[in-house]
Image: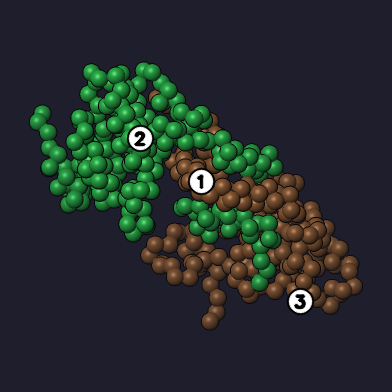
Chain colours: A brown, B green
Amino acid sequence: MAEFPKGIKNLINAFERLPGIGPKGATRLAFYLLNTPKAYVEDLASCLIKMKTEIKICKSCFSVSEQDICSICQDNRRNKAQICVVERAIDVMAIENMGDYKGVYHVLGGVINPLEHVGPDELKIDELVQRVKIMLTDEKYLNCNLEIILATNPTMEGEATALHIKKRLEGLKIKISRIGSGLPIGADLEYADQATLCRALDGRRDI
Amino acid sequence: MAEFPKGIKNLINAFERLPGIGPKGATRLAFYLLNTPKAYVEDLASCLIKMKTEIKICKSCFSVSEQDICSICQDNRRNKAQICVVERAIDVMAIENMGDYKGVYHVLGGVINPLEHVGPDELKIDELVQRVKIMLTDEKYLNCNLEIILATNPTMEGEATALHIKKRLEGLKIKISRIGSGLPIGADLEYADQATLCRALDGRRDI
């Protein structure tokens, strides 16, 4: 049985390590690239390297940025007294795409997950507490109502992380809220799972 | 609405051009790579460039190779008098993985597809006819029965290409065959489409 030439085999192996790409998909991608113009493959390779060297982590909110402080934290039109706490930088983009949120963010860098050995110390929770404490002593925010919106995913780990952060912020003069959870728009009661349905009833609102 | 930093946006755009990867998948890949070690991303980038520079096209069968002549064409244990004609190099690997075929290959580089402006001249058909003619005058193959197995895909374009090649090889003292087509192993008559069922009946064999 003949094998793939080494150059192709190495590329397939590299592709296979990406999430959602299996052996068949990786092979397909490698052979597709074999037949594309060299310029595109070089562009892809340089984009990869550039992304890794050019992208920084914002020193204020830990989201992705081109500068030391990201464009959202630098924007004076945003409400700095409203901080939305999310798991990852990609969640920032999801909320931004909505176009409705005018506050700022705080990216934790993950969730508490004992099975994968991720404890609170691995996340930017200390930094969040510190950030809030500094804001509370800052004259600028004297007359503002500080609000922390805990927008970790409504999974077991996300809930646990939200609870942990709530405890850490207890006693501080701020409002802490959790994003709503229940049936997504367009869903059908008939097919909803019990946990979601239970949450939707708990979170019922007056209309 | 904030936008992704340019470095990430460029990488997402580059990923989106790959087959089977949409905007969501491309974004997911880019953010995944943001959190992986720099070494892996550099490895992926160098694999891409190396693949494009190191991989050559075999001068005999037009499959992928590390040298001018691929390992299959160089292998003296293979039956050079049996040539399996396939559309793409990846098809060579599919047949090789089976482990049963002991002949050699000829890669066309595609199929005749008028809708995409691919005519017989864009494929390695002239090269195949030439290859067969040279073999017929070669003393080495005097006592061999030359066989050409047309293994293009059983699609409309693949069938048309196989027919075209058959016509081009007409009159030469060789055996020309087409890979069998019918129900795949494990299939169910109930769910088979009419064209496949029709082909399965046509291709029935004595047992």
Separation of disc 2 and disc 1 at Cα? Answer: 21 Å
The residue identified by callout 3 is A77
Q: What element carries label 1?
A: helix
Q: Residue at x 72, y 71 (%)?
A: A103
Mark 2: amino acid: His
* Identity, as a three-letter code, of the amino acid under mark 1: Leu
Q: What element carries label 2?
A: strand
Where is residue B70? Give x, y as percent: 45, 28
Q: In this figure, which residue is indicated by the disc labeled 1? A: A33
Residue drawn where x is 69% and y is 61% of the image: B5
Say which label, 1 or 3, has the lower sequence index.
1
In x, y percent, where is residue A101? 66, 73
Q: Is residue A171 left or right of residue B193?
A: right
Camera-nearest label, 2 or 1: 2
Quarter occupied by residue A155: bottom right
Residue A44 visible in image: no
Q: Three-letter amino acid code at disc 3?
A: Arg
The residue at the point 59 percent across, 50 percent down is A39
Could you tell me which chain the residue with mark 3 belongs to?
A
Q: Which of B196 and A58 is in front in this view?
A: B196
Read off the residue under disc 2: B106
Compared with residue A100, is residue B92 higher up or lower down, i.e. above or below? above
| Quadrant in the picture for residue B94 | top left
Callout 3: SS: loop
Same chain, marks 2 and 1?
Answer: no
Left or right: B83 as drawn, with respect to B26: left
Q: Mark 2 lies on which chain?
A: B
* Chain ID at mark 1: A
